[in-house]
Each structure stands twice: as C-alpha cells, then as structure tokens.
Image (cartoon, coloured by chain):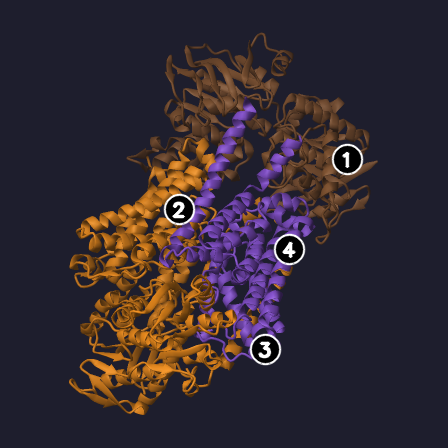
Chain colours: A brown, B purple, C orange
C-alpha cells in the first residue's frame, strides 16, 4: 500500500531549479532512505512534503488523496511529521508544551488543559525511551534530548509518515541504537519513514529502500539489500571515488602539544593526559557528552583549564582565551559550523582572515588587497566553490562553508589544528576533499586532533585514537590495534 | 523529582519574587517613615494615576513577548485622547467616544502591525517612524489647542466620581485578568509565546507568526485607545500633548517586570508588579521628602540596580549549579 | 601587492550601497532639488555650512551610535549623557573655578565614566543594552538635574570657547566643522579600515561566531559603549559652546533623533550591517529636511511626518531590492501578494480615514479666522515678519498667534510662525539661523535661553534684520525692542501677593512648575522666594513639584502634595497645563479649604474659576501680546517708530507707551470669577 506518492515535483528559487521533477514513493512499514550530496534537493523535497513550501508543479498524494494545495496544517492532519537536523522547538517553553503544540487541534480560542499536556508528554517521552521532565524548559536541554522531544512529538502525532532529517548527526552510538528501536516500533505499526542521512552504514542497517537524489533529480531507487556503499556513492556523485580515506603513512616528529592531568570544572573534564606529534592525526572518539568538544574548547581557551597543565613544545603554557591559543598557533574548527565555524553573513574573504587580521593589516589597518589575495589563495587551494570571494559565506553549500572555516585556521599557519566533527553534514565529495587536505596538512608537519562520532572516519584517518568517557580519557589505541568494537567498549565505559 | 519541579517553578518566577520583595521593602520603609502613605485615598489615587500606564503595558507585554517593540504608544495615546474629546464634543455619548478612541488606536496599531508583520520592517524602525510622524502630525493639526467646552456628561461619564473610578478600575482589572488568563490558558495566548520564542518553530507548528504579530500590535493600539479614553474622562478637557514619555514608562515597567526583550519569556503578573514598583517609587520619594530634583536619578538608579542584582544572581546560580552538576 | 583580478575586486554595490543607501541618496537629491526651488536662499554656500553646523552635535551622536548598533546593541543614554557632561563642565568651570581646559577634560572624563558604566553592566553582567541604557537614560539626566537643582544655568563662558560653537573661519567655515570632520574620519577608519572595526561587524552578525574566531567580544563591545559615552561628552562641549550655556536639559530627545539618522542610513537594528557613509546620508537627509522646511516657510511639524515616511519607505525599498535572496532563505508564510495588497490597502485607508476625520473635526472646532491665511507668497514684496514662540503647540502661544495673525492682516505683512516642537533648547537658535539665511525683514523671539540666543540675534541685527523680543527678553544689545508684557519680577511678585492675600499672609503652600529645568519658571520661582523672604515671613513654601507641561502629571503631583502636606492651603501652578491639573486634583479631593492660583490661560481655567476651585489666574492678554508684537515689527520695518519715541499708535490697542527700548503692554492681569468671561483665549 502506498502511503505517500510524489510525482514530478518541481520547485525553483529565483531562477535556480532546486527540484527538476522528482518522483518518490513511500510504502507502509518501510524505511525509505533519501541520500544525496548537500544541495541535491533533499531539504526542498521535504519542505514540499510537509507543506512548508509550495511546489511549482507536480502532485503529492497521501494514501491516494491529492494534497493540492499542501499546507503545514493539512500535511500534519494527514499524519506527516518531520524531525529536522536542527530541532524546531520553542526554547522558552516547557517540554510538555512543545509536544502539545503540534498535537492539539487548531483553534485560537480553545482552552489549554495543562494537566492533560503533562500527562501526555510523560507518556510520549516514555515511549520514546527518554527520561526528561515534562516541566523543563527546552532551552535547558542538550541537543540529543531536544531531538528526542521532536521524536516524541512525532510519535504523539501518530505519524503515519515520519521524516527524519539527519537524526543521528549529534547522537552517540547508544542513542542511535535507541532511536533505531523507536523506528522499528513505528514501522511495526505500519508507519512509513523517510530517513535522510550522510552515514551510509546507518542506511544499510535500518533502511529497506534507498533513493538517491542528485542535482534536483531522483537518479535511482534501490532495495538496500541489492546495493552497496560504493554504488550509492557513485550514484550520488556520479563518479567513483577511488579511496574513501586517503590516509598515508607520514613520518612523525617530536611532541608538539601535551596535556598533563588537565582538568576544568566548568568544562567538565578531568585528568586528561594526551600528546600529539608533528605529522600525527590524533583521533578523539567517545559518545556525545563524553567531553571531547569540551576538551577541545579547553585547549582553545574557550573554557580555560583550572588544573593540570598544557605543554607546548616542551614548555608549559596557559591558554586563558582563544586569543592566546591563536598566538600559540592553535586552531580550532568547531562542531557547529553555522553558529561558530563561519559568520554566515560575512563574505568569504572576511571569514578567511577573521582569526588572523594581524596578517593582513598594517598598524591595525586592514589592507584590502592583501586580504583579497589571501582569500583567493585559499579559495583556489581548498577548491571552495563560490561565485566570488565577496559572496556571503551562508550562500555556500555546507561542505564549502566547512572549507571556509578550515581556511580561516590555515590562515594563521597553525602548528596544532583541532577539527571537531569536520565532515558532519558535509556531502560526500567535500568530505573526501577535506580528508585529503588533512593528510596534506599532516605531511607539512601539523599536529592534528580530530574529533568524530563516525567510527569509520576515525579508524580511517587517525594514527592514534584516544577514547573519552565521562570527561576523562578512557584509553588510547594505536591505528593497528583499533577496531570499532574496542573503541565502543571504551566509550561505553 | 518533586524537588526539581519546585526548583523549576521558583526559577521561572524569580523576577516576580524579587519584585514583590522590592515592593515590600519600599512598603516597609513607608510604613515606618510615612504611615500616611497607606490610606485608602492614596492607594486609589495611585491606582488611578497609573491606570493608563498599566493598560498600555498589558499590550506592550504582548508585543515584547513576540519579540517586537512599540515605541509609538505615547503618540497614539495623544491622538486617541484628542479623538475621544472631539467625538464627545460632537455630541457622541461618552462611552461611544471612548470606543471610537479605541478604534482609532486599533487602526494606528494595525498600521504598525502591517508594516512590521507583512512588510517585514523591524518594529523599532516602524514605531520610531510612527512615533515621530503621529506626534508631529497631531501637533500640526491641533496646533496645541486643547479640546475644551466638553459636555458636562463627559467627565466621569456624567456619573459620580467614585462610580466611574470604579468602572475604570474594573475595566483595567478585567483587561489584566483577561489577558493574563488568556496568555496562560488559551491557545491564542500560547501562540504569542511561541512566536516570540521561535518564529521558525511556530511556523512549523502551524502558527502564522505574521498574523500573531499583526494582532498584538493592533491590540496594543486598541488598549492604548482604551487607556486614553478612560484617562480623558477623569477631566473636563483634553490636552493635545498627552502621553509624552508614555512609551518609556511602559517599556520600563514591562522589562522590570521580567519580560525578556528577546521575546518568549515573561508575563502579565510581572508587568503588573513592574507597573506597581515604578508607580510607587515617585510618590514614595515625595512622601519621604526627597527633592524632586533627585527623583529621576534615583528612579534610573533603582531600575539599574534591580536588573543588575538579578543578573548577578543568575550568574552566580549558573556557575554554582554547573559546578554542582559536574561534581 | 599585485593588482587584484577584476573578479576579486569588491563590487561597487558592496562598497557604496550595501544596505540600500541609494534610496537615501536619491531622497537627499530630491530634497535638495525641491527646496532649491521653493526655499529662499536654500541653495547657497552659506546655508550649506549652516546645515553642517547644526548637524555637528547630532552627527557626533549618530556616528557614535553606528558602531554600537553594528554590534547589535543600542545606547539610549547618549542624550542624557550630553546633559550630564554639560553640567559637569559648567559646574567645574564656574562652581569649582577650574580653567576651561580642565573643565572640558573633566566633562570628557564624565562621558568616559558614563560609557564605562554602561559597558560594565552590558558586558560584565550580560544585561541587554536596551535595559541598561534605558536605566542610565533616566539616571544620567537625573544626576544632571540633581547637581543643578534643575535651575542652575552656567553661561558667560570665555570667548575662545564660545568661538568653538559660534565662530567662523574665514568668515564662512563654522569652527566646529573640523571636529565633525575628524570624528567622521575617525569612525570611518575605525569601522571600514581597522582590524577592530572588522571584528565589530563579526560581533554584530554572530557574537558566538566571533568568540570562536578568537575575538575578545566583551572587550570590543565595551569599547563601543565607552566611545559612545566619550562622543556624547564631546558633543556636549560643542553644544555648550554653540548655545553659550550648560544646563540639565541639554540634548533632550537627541538619542531618538540620532537613532533615527543611523537607522535611516541603513544600519541594521539586529547588528552586523551599517556604514559611516550611510549614517551621514541619514543625518543630512534629516537636517536638510528641517532646514529646507524652515527656508520654505513650511510648518516644522512636517519634519516628523516626512522623516517617519522616509524611514519606512527607505527600508521597504531597500528590502525590495534584495528580496529574492531573502525570500528563499526564510521559509515565509505563504501569503498571496494580492491578499497582502488588499490588507495593506484596507489598513492604509482606515488610517487615512481616522487621520482625515481627525483633521476635519479638529479644524471644524477651531474658531473661524484662526486657521486663515498663513501668508501666501503672492503679491508684491511685502515685509516678512518671523515670529517664534518658545514652544509650538503650547496653548499659551497658540493664543498669541491669533493676535499676531490679526495684526499681520491689518498691517499687510507676511507672518512666519515657527518654533521648537520639542523640549530641545538648541532648536530656537537653529530656527533663527535659518531665518537669517532666508533674509526675513524682522524677527520676534520669545526667548527660552537668554545666554544662548543673544549671539545669534546680534548676528541677525548685523545683517540688517530688525529684532524684537517678546514674552521673554534677550540681552538688551541683541534686540531693538522688547515687547514687555510683564517682567519675571512682576509675575513672581503678583503671584506671591495674590497667595498672601488669599491666605491672609499666613500659611503653607506648594508650587507645581513646568519642567524642572524650564528657564522661565525657575526665574519666577526665584522672585517668589525673594518676595516671601522680604514681605511674608509667615508664608511657607513647602515643595516644588514638576509637571513636565503635562496636565495629567500636574494632577497626580497635586494629589500627592495634598496628602504629604495636609497643611498646604494653596497650590500655585506656574505652567499653563499645571493650573487645570492642580484644580482638578483639588476638586476631586473634596477639599474646600485649598486654594488654587497660578499662571495659565483663562480658557483652560474658566470652568474651575466658576466652580470656585481656582481663585485667580495671573496673566496678560496673550492675544494683545501677539498683536502688539507684530504691529511693532511692522512699524519698525516701515521705519515708523523713530529712535527715542515715547509712544506710538498700535491699531486697536490705541497708543502704546515706549519706555527706552521696551514697549509696554501693561501690567499682569488677574482674572477671577468677575471678569474671566470677558476673555476668550
């Protein structure tokens, strides 16, 4: 039985054709994965399905009923629910109210039943397998908790058609397992799930069929059992990627950065002892919340350390602020690209030089020509796809934005570079380019610390892997001895 | 778990509690230093004097809750006052004239609302423009002339003073209770919070933020008109320069009342307390015999001290709780 | 550095019109064209420099606010900071006897301290800027009022300082111009050239993003508020020099005017966007509008109406230009354009209907004749007499205007009636300057600030314009004649005598004044105190409360007085709206033993006089005052009053006495139940 059928959907923005006649169908009880590089049209297709955008042409039908015109209210009433990568919740309202908002019937002059709201929230959260107080403000929840609230909303809506947009990008392995259990339960009740992810392993684990989008077209739909990773990647990019991880053996130099029993109460890390050498890529694994990002932020001076010491080139140093870190040639590409990695509204050129204005200025005055030349150099070197170096960074695709964030730190000529989830939400093509770049940088003698939740990436790229748990290092594995199982068992404590 | 619940409750009413504390502190000082402060007559006069600020602040609370601001209320107030007077002088019965003032206010609020919600001009820009334009426009038309020679039935609706003061207070109380209750218990009220908390999420939840913003601005206009009408009937003539500085008074009251300028957080109870606190500071200082020349400095200082103390406490709590959580 | 390839050069639009500044440039050109056609002597070099001179103080504030708003903040306290710095300067110079240089340094220090306080609260405690500066907005001016007790007016500054605000270089270049130019250059360099400026933009777009790029956000934000305090104090010094006086009402309302200029110039209120160039365009489109309206003899209230319209229009048009991209990024609610258009049309129609009926209604209520003929420019060369009240829209002055228009008709002259619409004391000077530029034949001013306006009146006399003062006098050498309706002494003494008569020479009373810093009222209060000390030892002045020329506030203040001072037997209101406010309060209190007297208009008090709440109102015949002023001006321009004349015939007023350089209208008049119905003004 067809739950949802989209036929020849087309949509364009200001002359740019985002969808060029996409057809897609979802059956009862299936998990239909939707993959494609960033900008392939996945988000637009979802927006059309949920009624957030109106298609220019094409039809959309739910259980044979035509949705024209579609609207958020109509889509919801037919059981379409979406959980986005960025949770769309009200930070100032309670969990219960957030859940209730999408579930209660319309009508502005209807009275709110607070007791029923709390009861309902408690029940739905339990079904989603979470232990969150319904009375808490959503703004105080962590990102994974917020996503669970989103899923609880979808469960409550008795969603027949659940759209999950990169649901696991900020979840840890354990949380992913729990999510998959919830998905399986929903499937069992006959719901259809549209599952979007860049993590192809997940797709083979949970999906039944997969549709590949490329440049606004659906290029292929396959049963997951009949396809494999290489084929999917080929379909997405239209060409074969020879090596997924371009890691090479690089001769390692002396220790650049070392931490000795480093701790920070504010960041929640303790007794971290690590070292990274010239030319080495140190992988930092662990569950979300295990202190990986917090360690990076401590090393970068965002939440300064209050115990232990940081040793740089054999000399103990204090890093009380990012400015100090920059002076010590430590760069940090943060996890949250949109909020921290780049300043979206600023041009590419200005983003590139933001952390190192000293290099392009004389006596405190910026030399524009020098800045533009520098930006051009990095745009060419990192193959950043942009109309102009004066285009705002937010007009670039995710992968290219990430390259801009990287360029900013390369511009300070760093000796230590910390990369926090460098390929999260990045399309496959850019991903391998970023990996290649990491190897190239290591070859030039940089010491790289890479945080990643994607185990294959860690295994494929790192020379050594430090696994964190509960704010401390649970163990360090060499490249040779590391396996997924070993990392996971350390991460779970 | 129960404890955490209580913690949450206390936390969300933090500002209200400190406001009550501040008001009680002033009351305590007054009880010792100037017992004459607590007479029925004085309280009644205080309430009547702050009634316009209160009614306008109700609307302002909604506006700020949606993350917008309206600095044109003072100019709207002046126009609505004159409108009420002019209509009454043309022979309209006084309640009808007040209603007409409300409508005039709603029209001006709707103009603001349309420009903000549908033309997407930032609210501070729109209302800055209408504030200047409406005030100067009124001055141009009236040339400062008061509306005098009003019918005898204009003042106090032609009733006794006590009766119509009762009416005015009842209207204000009804409005405050109605809006406060609606904000908490009606879907429409929750839509106001939702819009201010996250316009994107609101849109996805099927709320039209633009409609909400338009509605609260229009409502604020209507409330301003209502306040102007109720204020006008306390006298037998209408000045052309009413409501000077009203915007600052109401915004200060709402903000001191704990409504977040970024929207989504706050409420009517806080606003009522904010109006009360700011409303009693001035007379209290007079009772204490402090010269009028230092009054403004003290008022500004008290506002700053109140928000600063609050901020310090939040700081302390955040750091404290963080440490507690980690250990 | 090698030349950049063309594709990497900054696009023209990014540099000059990133935020739709072209709309404003267009508006500016349009304004200039229109006023060149309709304004007299508008398009001249002299007028150009006048406009620049009048823009200096506002310009300094607008420049300082530009980086503040670029970081996503706001500073509402700049106008109040000006007042505080001005008063600090005055107090240091006169009361502490410091040399002017040291006093200036002290004032700048005060500005820095104020800015630092804002910065500390905003960055140290993380309180939103709008809340902090709303508080300091009250506090700074409050401190200024406290220091001066509202009344102290520092003036008679050294020549060199006054030169700074009023002098010229080579006879044409205003002395303060280099200060503005330096500030413009400094802020342009700061924002558009320096590394610090770049980080300010980053902070405005995304504070978190800036922090992750290693920018010390708190320090940068603190810097802009600190600079804003400093710039406000520099503006205060220029203002003091320009006006020749330092008082606690300096810079009233400047914060909103400056914000208007900045926002008009395309600076985004949410931060990240804005240019110095845009702010200058915004600033000059407002000041040129003001100046042009005056030179074209159009009512100055149009300034507000037009500024508001341009503000909204500039933003909407700027948005239209950049809408396609904006549309896609925010998933807008699907609302059809047609629906939107209909809705907007309905709202605009409703607004117009309300406005229209209001205009019609109000006009219809006004006595015929009052609104008649604001002197068209038809016919041959008729003398032009420009007359200025202290405040337009004050009922007192509106009744003067009626008489002035009557005289203008009789003597066949053109009358320009214009003046300040707000509380800003610098506005009178600006209006006189524009009249000098326009070359009117006679100027008649009701002086708000004696020290401030005399220099510009002298300048008018040097250019051959006949200068009169009426209602309140300037320095004697700054005008030909003073139309003396009553001296402050006369008013103060009459009021005191009247109070003593009612109270039988014994008892307590309180005063409800206008604004605490109002010059006139403070003069009267001084004479009241002197009379009390000399003649009535048993009369006691309990308290002085402000009404800010707001009837409702006078009402509330009187209610409080009655309760705090139950022994008060008399309330004296010394501003036109204060008397009816006080009277209503006394009536509602039910106290029959409290008298109300004061200085107000008969029409505002008639009902209370008849009801027996108000015993007497002291005033002169305002309509006759306006009439006599214009009549004298008309005779003067016709050289019909020879020097040394002791009297002349003034139309319906008959023969009027001239005493030296004063034209005497008569003594203050006491209106009471017996005679008040004979007057209608």
From mark 3 to mark 2, how far is it between C-alphas? 52 Å
Residue B153 shows which numbered tag?
Answer: 3
Q: Chain for mark 4? A: B
Q: Chain for mark 2? A: C
Q: Which residue is mark 4?
A: B177
Instruction: Tell me which residue sits at (25%, 83%) in the image.
Output: C664
Q: Residues within 10 Å of mark 2 (few under 14, many from 20)?
A: many
Q: Residues within 10 Å of mark 4 (few under 14, many from 20)?
A: some
Q: Which residue is mark 2?
A: C68
Q: Which residue is mark 1?
A: A26
Q: In the figure, A399 relative to C651: above or below? A: above
Image-based side of C365 in relation to C62, left or right: right
Q: Chain for mark 3? A: B
Q: Chain for mark 1? A: A
| Secondary structure state at the residue bearing disc 1 | strand
Does residue B112 show up? no
Q: In the figure, C568 relative to B53: above or below? A: below
From mark 4 to mark 3, how far is it between C-alphas? 29 Å
Q: Are marks 2 and 1 in contact (CB under 8 Å)?
A: no
């Amino acid at each position: 039985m067809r739950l949802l059928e989209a036929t020849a959907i087309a949509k364009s923005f200001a002359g740019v054709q985002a969808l060029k006649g996409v057809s897609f169908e979802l059956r009862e009880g299936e998990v239909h994965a939707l993959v494609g590089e960033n900008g392939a049209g996945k988000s637009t297709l979802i927006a059309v399905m949920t009624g957030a955008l109106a298609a220019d042409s094409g039809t959309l039908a739910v259980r044979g009923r035509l949705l024209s015109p579609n609207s958020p209210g109509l889509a919801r009433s037919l059981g379409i629910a979406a959980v986005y990568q960025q949770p769309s919740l009200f930070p100032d309202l309670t969990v219960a109210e957030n859940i209730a908002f999408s579930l209660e019937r319309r009508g502005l002059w209807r009275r709110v039943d607070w007791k029923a709201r709390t009861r309902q929230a408690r029940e739905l959260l339990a079904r989603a397998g979470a232990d969150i107080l319904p009375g808490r403000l959503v703004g105080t929840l962590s990102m994974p908790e917020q996503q669970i609230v989103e899923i609880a909303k979808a469960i409550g809506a008795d969603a027949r058609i659940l759209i999950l947009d990169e649901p696991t990008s900020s979840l840890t392995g354990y949380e992913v397992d729990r999510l998959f259990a919830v998905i399986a339960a929903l499937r069992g009740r006959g719901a259809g799930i549209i599952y979007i992810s860049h993590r192809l392993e997940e797709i083979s684990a949970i999906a039944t069929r997969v549709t590949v989008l490329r440049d606004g077209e659906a290029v292929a739909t396959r049963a997951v059992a009949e396809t494999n990773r290489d084929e999917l990647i080929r379909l997405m990019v239209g060409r074969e990627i020879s090596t997924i991880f371009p890691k090479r053996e690089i001769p390692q130099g002396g220790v650049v950065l070392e931490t000795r029993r480093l701790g920070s109460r504010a960041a929640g890390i303790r007794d971290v002892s690590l070292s990274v050498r010239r030319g080495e890529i140190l992988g930092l694994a662990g569950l979300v919340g295990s202190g990986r990002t917090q360690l990076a932020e401590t090393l970068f001076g965002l939440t300064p350390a209050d115990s232990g010491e940081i040793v740089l080139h054999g000399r103990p140093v204090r890093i009380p602020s990012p400015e100090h870190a920059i002076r010590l040639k430590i760069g940090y590409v943060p996890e949250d690209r949109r909020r921290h990695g780049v300043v979206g509204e600023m041009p590419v050129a200005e983003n590139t030089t933001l952390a190192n204005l000293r290099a392009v200025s004389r006596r405190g005055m910026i030399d524009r020509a020098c800045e533009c030349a520098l930006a051009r150099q990095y745009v060419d070197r990192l193959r950043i796809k942009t109309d102009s170096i004066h285009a705002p960074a937010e007009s670039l695709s995710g992968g290219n934005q990430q390259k801009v964030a990287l360029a900013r730190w390369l511009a300070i000529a760093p000796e230590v570079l910390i990369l926090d989830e460098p390929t999260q939400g990045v399309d496959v093509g850019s991903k391998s380019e970023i990996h290649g770049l990491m190897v190239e940088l290591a070859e030039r003698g940089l010491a790289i610390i890479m945080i990643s939740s994607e185990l294959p990436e860690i295994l494929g790229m790192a020379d050594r892997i430090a696994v964190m748990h509960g704010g401390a290092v649970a163990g360090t594995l060499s490249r040779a001895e590391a396996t997924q199982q070993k990392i996971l068992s350390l991460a779970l404590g | 778990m129960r404890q955490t619940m209580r913690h949450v409750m206390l936390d969300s009413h933090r500002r209200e509690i400190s406001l009550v504390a501040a008001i009680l502190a002033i009351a305590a000082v007054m009880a010792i230093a100037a017992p004459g402060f607590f007479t029925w007559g004085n309280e009644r006069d205080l309430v009547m004097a702050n009634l316009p600020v209160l009614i306008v602040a109700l609307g302002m609370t909604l506006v700020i809750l949606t993350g917008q601001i309206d600095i044109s209320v003072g100019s709207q107030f002046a126009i609505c006052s004159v409108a009420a007077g002019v209509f009454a002088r043309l022979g309209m019965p006084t309640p009808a004239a007040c209603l007409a003032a409300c409508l005039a206010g709603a029209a001006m609020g709707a103009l603001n609302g349309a420009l903000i919600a549908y033309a997407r001009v930032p609210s501070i820009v729109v209302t800055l423009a209408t504030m200047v334009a409406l005030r100067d426009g009124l001055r141009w038309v009236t040339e400062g002339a008061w509306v005098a020679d009003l019918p005898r039935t204009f003042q106090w609706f032609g009733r006794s003073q006590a009766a119509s003061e009762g009416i005015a207070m009842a209207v204000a109380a009804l409005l405050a209770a109605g809006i406060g209750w609606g904000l908490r218990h009606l879907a429409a009220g929750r839509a106001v919070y939702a819009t201010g908390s996250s316009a994107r999420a609101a849109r996805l939840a099927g709320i039209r933020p633009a409609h909400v913003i338009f509605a609260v601005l229009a409502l604020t206009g209507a409330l301003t008109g209502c306040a102007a009408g109720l204020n006008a009937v306390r006298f037998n003539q209408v000045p052309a320069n009413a409501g000077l500085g009203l915007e600052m008074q109401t915004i200060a009251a709402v903000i001191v009342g704990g409504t977040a300028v970024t929207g989504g957080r706050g409420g009517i109870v806080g606003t009522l307390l904010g109006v009360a606190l700011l409303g009693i500071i001035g007379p209290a200082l007079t009772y204490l015999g402090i010269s009028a020349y230092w009054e403004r400095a003290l008022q500004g200082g008290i506002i700053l001290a109140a928000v600063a103390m609050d901020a310090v406490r939040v700081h302390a709590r955040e750091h404290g709780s963080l440490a507690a959580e980690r250990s | 550095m090698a030349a950049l390839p063309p594709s990497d050069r900054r696009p023209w639009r990014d540099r000059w019109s990133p935020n739709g500044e072209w709309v404003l440039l267009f508006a500016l050109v349009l304004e200039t064209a229109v006023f060149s056609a309709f304004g007299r002597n508008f398009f001249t070099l002299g007028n150009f420099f006048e406009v620049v001179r009048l823009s200096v103080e506002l310009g300094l504030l607008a420049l300082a606010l530009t980086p503040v708003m670029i970081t996503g903040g706001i500073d509402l306290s700049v106008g109040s900071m000006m007042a505080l710095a001005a008063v600090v300067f005055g107090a240091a110079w006169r009361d502490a006897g410091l040399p002017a240089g040291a006093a200036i340094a002290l004032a700048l220090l005060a500005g820095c301290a104020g800015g630092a306080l804002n910065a500390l609260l905003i960055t140290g405690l993380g309180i939103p800027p709008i809340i902090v500066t709303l508080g300091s907005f009250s506090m700074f001016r409050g401190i200024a009022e406290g220091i001066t007790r509202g009344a102290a007016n520092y003036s008679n500054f050294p020549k060199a300082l006054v030169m700074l605000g009023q002098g010229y270089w080579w006879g044409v270049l205003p002395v303060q111009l280099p200060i503005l130019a330096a500030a413009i250059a400094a802020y342009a360099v700061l924002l558009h050239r320096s590394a610090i400026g770049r980080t300010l933009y980053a902070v405005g777009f995304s504070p978190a993003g800036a922090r992750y790029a290693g920018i010390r956000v708190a320090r940068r934000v603190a810097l802009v508020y600190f600079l804003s305090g400093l710039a406000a104090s520099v503006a205060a010094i220029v203002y003091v020099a320009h006006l020749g006086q330092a008082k606690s009402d300096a810079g009233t309302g400047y914060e909103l005017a400056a914000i208007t200029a900045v926002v008009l110039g395309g600076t985004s209120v949410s931060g990240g966007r804005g240019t110095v160039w845009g702010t200058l365009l915004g600033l000059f489109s407002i000041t040129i509008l003001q100046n042009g309206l005056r030179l074209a003899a159009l009512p100055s209230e149009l300034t507000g109406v037009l500024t508001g319209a341009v503000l909204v229009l500039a933003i909407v048009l700027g948005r239209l230009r950049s809408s396609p991209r904006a549309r896609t990024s925010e998933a807008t609610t699907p609302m059809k354009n047609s629906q939107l258009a209909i809705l907007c049309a309905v709202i605009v129609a409703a607004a117009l209907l309300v406005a229209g009926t209001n205009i019609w209604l109000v006009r219809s209520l006004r006595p015929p004749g009052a609104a008649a003929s604001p002197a068209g420019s038809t016919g041959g060369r008729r003398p032009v007499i420009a007359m200025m009240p202290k405040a337009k829209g004050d009922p007192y002055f509106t009744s003067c205007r009626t008489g002035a228009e009557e005289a203008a008709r009789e003597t066949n002259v053109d009358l320009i009636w214009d003046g300040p619409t707000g509380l800003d004391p610098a506005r009178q000077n600006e209006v006189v300057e524009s009249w000098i530029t326009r070359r009117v034949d006679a100027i008649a001013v009701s002086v708000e600030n004696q020290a401030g306006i005399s220099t510009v009146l002298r300048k008018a006399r040097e250019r051959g314009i006949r200068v009169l003062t009426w209602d309140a006098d300037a320095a004697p050498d700054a005008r030909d004649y003073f139309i003396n309706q009553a001296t402050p002494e006369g008013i103060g003494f009459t009021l005191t005598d009247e109070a003593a008569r009612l109270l039988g020479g014994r008892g307590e009373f309180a005063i409800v004044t206008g604004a605490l810093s109002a010059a006139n009222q403070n003069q009267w209060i001084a004479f009241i105190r002197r009379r009390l000390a000399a003649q009535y030892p048993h009369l006691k002045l309990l308290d002085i409360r402000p009404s800010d020329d707001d009837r409702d506030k006078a009402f509330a203040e009187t209610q409080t007085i009655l309760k705090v001072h139950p022994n008060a037997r008399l309330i004296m209101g010394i501003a036109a709206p204060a008397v009816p406010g006080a009277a209503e309060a006394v009536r509602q209190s039910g106290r029959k033993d409290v008298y109300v007297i004061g200085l107000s208009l008969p029409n505002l008090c008639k009902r209370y006089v008849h009801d027996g709440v108000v015993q007497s109102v002291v005033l002169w015949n305002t309509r006759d005052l306006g009439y006599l002023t214009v009549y004298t001006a008309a005779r003067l321009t016709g050289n019909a009053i020879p020097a040394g004349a002791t009297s002349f015939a003034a139309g319906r007023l008959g023969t009027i006495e001239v005493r030296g350089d004063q034209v005497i209208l008569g003594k203050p008049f006491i209106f009471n139940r017996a005679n008040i119905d004979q007057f209608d003004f």
